[in-house]
Image (cartoon, rainbow, N blue to C red):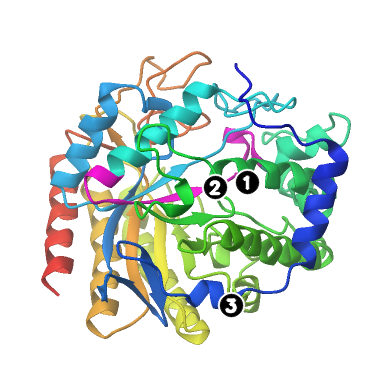
Amino acid sequence: MSTDDSPMMNRRTLLAATAAVAATPALPALARQTASAGFVRREGMQFTLDGKPYRYVGANLWYAAWIGHEGRLARELDALAADGVTNLRIAASAEWSPLKNAVRPAFHDQDDAYNEALLTGLDHATAEIGKRGMKAVLYLTNFWEWSGGMATYLLWSNGGQYVDADAPWPDFPEFVSGFYRSPEAVARYHAHLRRIVTRVNSVTGKPYAEDPAIMGWQLANEPRPGGTDGNVDRTLPDFHAWISGTARLIKSLAPHHLVSTGGEGLKGSMERPGLVLSSQADDTIDYHTAHVWPGNWGWLDRTDMPGTHARAVALSTEYVARHVELAKQAGKPLVVEEFGYPRNGDVYDLGASTSMRDDLYSAIHNAVLASAREGGPLAGSNFWAWNGEGRARHPDFRFRSGDTAFLGDPPHEPQGWYGVFDQDVSTRRIIRDHAAALAAL
């Protein structure tokens, strides 16, 4: 790993910076200011791009920076563009961590030594996305362990104590919620945020903050205020302060870009509609997000997929509809930015059918189309995730330390569980058809 040449921030400076952000007044004018051509804007419940409605079919490609120096990146983006995908959600962080499933390499470590290959990989990714007229949404840390994330900032700040994600539920989310209450952990995260948001792209020479290829920034992947009602109630003031303070910081650095939390919606908010609304009420949060995981939430019994599939799709459709109503109450756009489903039989082999997954994709896409036709807030979707030409390297479909064949299924998950491969003809056809239908509106 190499250390980049910008000045390091010591602990006192970091804490002072965080205090200054917390004291910064709200910046609603920045959220609404007129941006130059090519930037996605929020106007009420709609996104616009150069004066026209902006709706999209998107994919999650979290590992884009990790393959940024490879020819594979261009091939994957070309395949996605051919299917009508115009929006990519990617990781702009990973912390070097002792957590068992944390991806390697990471962007930076406890001493703030940065991996230049990943930084320039992110440069290449945003440059290639921009070349194709696509837009990127970059998230800046992770509530979960697979990229280090909040748990790692916390252990860097508390003397090395941590709870790993294999602990009994809800020990891990309860531990991670301490991040919001730790000024030092938040300050270290803000230092990384500043480094990325203010970076000048080494490929294009353009500052990230002035790059219209970037639609927006997300505070984190799936930030939650905790794992139990009691702890959530104690954490909420700090959680809300972290959201508003961080969003204001991003807006001060990149006023042309949108900001969202990256949250799951109701499932990440203890099923409380009021918490969804309060966590995204600040005007610096431009749009709502929702994630849909029927196989992880017990809606789909993965040991009896044929018997529970219809129920899982129905509950997923209802879940999206509930978030459409919440977005209407908030007067903001909504994106279903993660949704995933296993291959038939809950197996990972490429020979297994994707017909049940295709049903869920169609249901999500139909919801986007219905909302678009009535002028509603649901503006786009990002399926989880694109595996493309990536393939599992081991017979047990498990990622192992040192592997470089990154897939959309993160290192803690079986490789091939939820990701869409380049050979998944029926799923790709559904994506292309949806893109055409959106474009025809």
Q: CA distance from mark 2 to mark 1?
A: 5 Å
User: Residue 364: x, y in percent?
Assistant: 30, 64
* CB contact under 8 Å: marks 2 and 1: yes
Q: Amino acid at mark 2?
A: Val
Residue at x 53% of width, y 31% of height: 412
- Look at mark 3 in the image and give the residue it sits on: 28
Upstream in sequence: badge 3 or badge 1: 3
Q: CA distance from mark 3 to mark 1?
A: 20 Å
Q: Amino acid at mark 3?
A: Pro
Q: Which stretch is magenta?
A: 130-149
Q: Nearer the viewer, residue 12 or 304?
A: 12
Residue at x 53% of width, y 55% of height: 218
Q: Amino acid at mark 1?
A: Arg
Q: In the drawing, does residue 125 fall left or right of residue 163?
A: left
Badge 3 density bin: few <14, some 14–19, many ≥20, Cα 10 Å: some
Residue at x 65% of width, y 31% of height: 6
Give above or below for 326 relative to 105: below
Q: Judging from the image, what secondary structure is the residue with disc 1 in?
A: helix
User: Residue 13: x, y in percent?
Assistant: 83, 43
Badge 2 density bin: few <14, some 14–19, many ≥20, Cα 10 Å: some
Give above or below for 78 relative to 133: above
- Look at mark 1 in the image and give the residue it sits on: 194
- Look at mark 2 in the image and give the residue it sits on: 197
- The answer to if 133 sits in the magenta stretch is yes
Which quarter of the figure is the N terminus placed in?
Answer: top right
Please say whether residue 37 is visible from this viewpoint.
Answer: yes
Q: Judging from the image, what secondary structure is the residue with disc 3 in?
A: helix
